[in-house]
Amino acid sequence: MSIVSQVKPLVVKALKDLYGQDYQESELTVSTTKPEFEGDYTLVLFSFVKQLKKSPEQLGEEIGNALTKAHPDFFTAYNVIKGFLNLTIPDHYWIQVLQSEFSNKRFGFKEANRQKVMVEYSSPNTNKPLHLGHLRNNFLGWSVAQMLKASGCEIIKSCVVNDRGIHICKSMIAWQRFGHGATPQSTNTKGDHFVGEYYVKFNDAYKKEVEALTAGGMKKEEAEKEAPLMKEAQQMLQDWEAGKPDVIALWKKMNSWVYAGFDVTYDRIGSDFDKMYYESETYLPGKKFVDEGLQQGLFFKKEDGSVWIDLTAEGLDEKLVLRKDGTSVYITQDLGLAQQKYEEFRYDQSIYVIADEQNYHMKVLKLILQKLGKPYADSIYHLNYGMVELPSGRMKSREGTVVDADEMIEEMVNVAKQKTEELGKVKDFLVTELKELYDTLALGALKFFLLRVDPKKRMIFNPEESIDFHGFTGPFIQYTHARIKSILRKQSVAGKPEPAGSLLKLEKDLIMALEQYPAVLEQAVAEHNPSVIAIYVFNLAKSFNTFYAEHSVMNAESEEKKQLRLQIAEMTAHVIASGMGLLGIRVPERM
RNA sequence: GGUCCGGUAGCUCAGUUGAAUAGAGCAAUUGCCUUCUAAGCAAUAGGUCAUUGGUUUGAAUCCAAUCCGGAUCACCA
């Protein structure tokens, strides 16, 4: 149990005993004491002033006095400054916390709670390679799943592959026209990049066709519809839906190239899935929702045969759920997929990791399911995150301003290699060890960079400045871990160390920080927010480095001190590794 | 235009269930490697918390209005 949750009931009781007033724990503000004041935890007194009709100073004295008298083992001192009661918790209490948890690898984690949570993330298109935005999605989804697992949930990670539609046909047309039988193998290109190039080629050629038509006097809008390439793509989509064998064969071939490419990237970044869904298989079942909605009178049919739902009462618009030609739209597919997922897994919660540009879509999806009375409707949670932008603005595939995921990782590995070589600390590493270290550092830097910011916020990525390896970064934390491990290799913790009397300030700071890990985890899970962990782990690492520069572990003043510091070091390493693990970041033993 | 999100140091971001002098990192300046890894530590400097008004003992945080930026409101997915 965290300190705060132990302090609060004692304060409530003191208030009751002293003034006969009942307060809820939620009415109390208890936080760690600011470093410039004496004490460990602080109670804010202002909120009682009015009701109890006493000055803050007087209240502080009375409560502080009562607490230290009633619990001399827990509160050893207090002071009152302005409206704040600062309480001191004795060293032996902190030492006890340390000794009971320092070797607990599951510190902060919870036992299984029988909650089943589905996390859908990544969800790529098969017509282009992954970019920086996808990486944010992947890292976020994977991390949130890991956090939920640590909090006791059973997790099903799923991925919906967008493998059908007009955009896929564009790549196919372009390859037929311009490919001349080239393959990823023959051109030595990663499959997803190979197909992505044809998507770009299509758009270039299409643009030219449109220009030619408008030059001939046609309106732009009309030209965009009449361009031969577009007509060809549309025809291909129809052929695909009709199951025309040669089109299906081409589609399968090109998709297999893309999947081979994706697999390499997923493997590299550590994304994995328990269940794959393909839109080519799930886009049809949604249609039965349309019948259901019509029967319930929830949907209505327009004269042209298209089906709609009226959400104006909810402050939204009329939303199309079925085209006039009877084919399904995006929302129809998603309705069907939600049902399919629920039938298969009977989840308690279903988390969709999708960018915030789809907030409206997800709102409508949930609303429709609620109106249809689906039992799983309320358990849908849209974990929305902001776009990753460049200093010049939003990334656009068509304008070639996307930061490609594979290239990004490669560049990070190069930076890691270069910096490591400059420092020259790992000359005795084997080639395979070096490779692993560079990967660990590169991905650590990249993941930390993308996860340290609140997911809900848009973030700006500046490729000029690239990603740093100093300060608030993954490598900084990884370095701290390696430092600790270096000590522990030289001197391991003895079996049953004795309490070491009083604590120095920096020792206590570290134990206090470590003690907060479970509470931090809880908050991060509640908010579905890995950045809470990232910030915490960074501050912990910083505290350790401050301590490290000031005090020696190996040459501590006494054997007791040495054991105490070894315990602190070991627990710090555990918590760093644990927290980073929840972010999907590995920590090296040496670097 | 409707709806939603955001605006904090030169830059990137914390802090937003109201609480002490608004915090980090980067960039800048300055010290510290003969003892556990200097990818580190310590220090200096940098702020009209978009603006105005309100609520409050107390506001970056809550409310209202305004300004600026973004997303979305497709028979695309």
Image (cartoon, coloured by chain):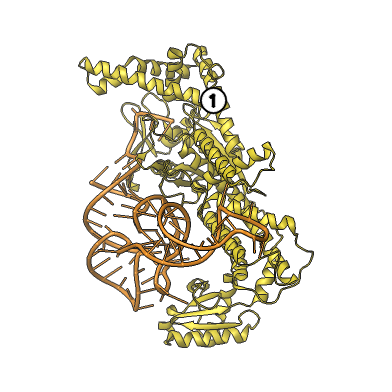
Chain colours: A yellow, B orange
Residue A391 drawn above or below residue A291: below
Image location of residue B53, percent across then percent down: 23, 68
Confirm whether residue A168 shows in the render: no
Identify which residue, A133 or A465, lies in the foreground. Answer: A465
Q: How crowded is mark 1: few (under 14 residues within 10 Å), some or many (20 or more)?
A: many
Q: Which residue lies furthest to the left in this view?
A: A217
Q: In which quarter of the image is the N terminus of chain A?
A: bottom right
Identify which residue, A290 or A236, lies in the foreground. Answer: A236
In-image side of B20 versus A223 (left or right): right
Give the residue at mark 1.
Answer: A190
Q: Identity of the amino acid at label 1?
A: Lys
Image location of residue A143, percent across then percent down: 56, 47
In-image side of A179 versus A208 (left or right): right
Query: At 58% across and 75% down in the image, what residue appears?
Result: A7
Image location of residue A457, percent across then percent down: 42, 50
Query: At 60% across and 37% down in the image, what residue appears?
Result: A273
What is the secondary structure assignment of the residue under circle 1?
loop
Instruction: State the count of labels.
Output: 1
Tell me the subunit letter for badge 1. Answer: A
Query: At 34% across and 19% down in the image, what residue appears?
Result: A206
Image location of residue A6, percent across then percent down: 60, 73
Query: At 58% across and 33% down in the image, what residue appears?
Result: A276
Residue A163 drawn above or below residue A451: above
Identify which residue, A293 or A343, lies in the foreground. Answer: A343
